[in-house]
Amino acid sequence: MVKWKEVAIAILILLLVIMTCGGAPILMAKYSPNSASISDDDDDDGGDDDDNPWEDSGESLGTAALVFLVLTLSIILWKPGVKLARQHLPDMLEMDNRLVKKNIGIANRWFMKIHDWLGFGAALIGTLHGLLMDDWGLDFWLPMGGFWVLVTSGYLMRVKWPPKQIRKGARLLHMQRLIAIVSVIILIIAHD
């Protein structure tokens, strides 16, 4: 069951990030039918010879996408931490094993919701970043496709409406850390 309140909050946060970086208005201006009529009167800015007036906003969106991606990839540390906490925390706190594990489970579910939305935000903002930049080629779009595969498979795991075989396939696909690792490595190489 979709909790519309959580969806609305997550979309609002994403829209605020995109609007703060200037991506939405610039993207609409770039792809509007009369975008060719926008004149570039930047002669007084001291030697900025860029032909793309949207590149600064694209770079800002790239920074936001990087932050979202790093926060999304924090799952690399979270999952082993949860496993260790389930094993050792009840003894360290000298509390009931079931109570500690229940609280760890609640925290893990919240983290996974945040992870899902941050991943979606990273993919969305990264895609907008790519659309605003002039020099994006296949070496940039392949990893973005990999991130969208991860976002989609994560969504399929979360909603639980597909048949069990599809969910199992999505889980296997989502657990393929290789997609994330290769995508990040290709993006790092492409940005250098």
Image (cartoon, helix red, strand yellow):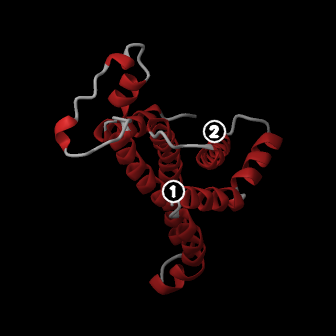
> Which residue sits at x=68%, y=39%?
160
| Vertical arrangement, residue 41 with respect to residue 93, above or below | above
Q: Nearer the viewer, residue 185 or 148?
A: 185
Q: How many marks?
A: 2
Of callouts 2 and 1, the N-terminal one: 2
State whether residue 51 appears in this view: yes
Q: Which residue is mark 1?
A: 191
Q: Residues within 10 Å of mark 1 (few under 14, many from 20)?
A: few
| Residue that protrudes farthest toward the right in the picture | 165
| Residue that protrudes farthest toward the left in the picture | 44
* Mark number, residue 159: 2
State whether residue 17 appears in this view: no
Q: Is residue 177 toward the left or the right of residue 172 in the image?
A: left
How far apart in space, not on screen, are marks 2 and 1 (Cα)?
34 Å
Quadrant of the drawing holding the N terminus: top right
Q: Nearer the viewer, mark 2 or mark 1?
A: 1
Q: Nearer the viewer, residue 117 or 15?
A: 15
Q: Is residue 156 toward the left or the right of residue 79 in the image?
A: right
- The answer to which quarter of the image holds residue 166 is top right
Q: Position of residue 167 (x, y in %)?
A: 75, 44
Tags 2 and 1 in contact by the CB under 8 Å rule?
Answer: no
> Which residue sits at x=41%, y=33%?
8
| Vertical arrangement, residue 169 with respect to residue 180, above or below | above
Label 1 secondary element: helix
> Which residue sits at x=64%, y=62%?
181
Q: Position of residue 178 (x, y in %)?
A: 71, 61
| Vertical arrangement, residue 71 with respect to residue 160, above or below | below
Q: Position of residue 10 (x, y in %)?
A: 42, 40
Label 2 secondary element: helix
Query: Could you tell me the amino acid type at mark 2?
Result: Val
Q: Residues within 10 Å of mark 2 (few under 14, many from 20)?
A: few
Query: Could you tell me the amino acid type at mark 1?
Result: His
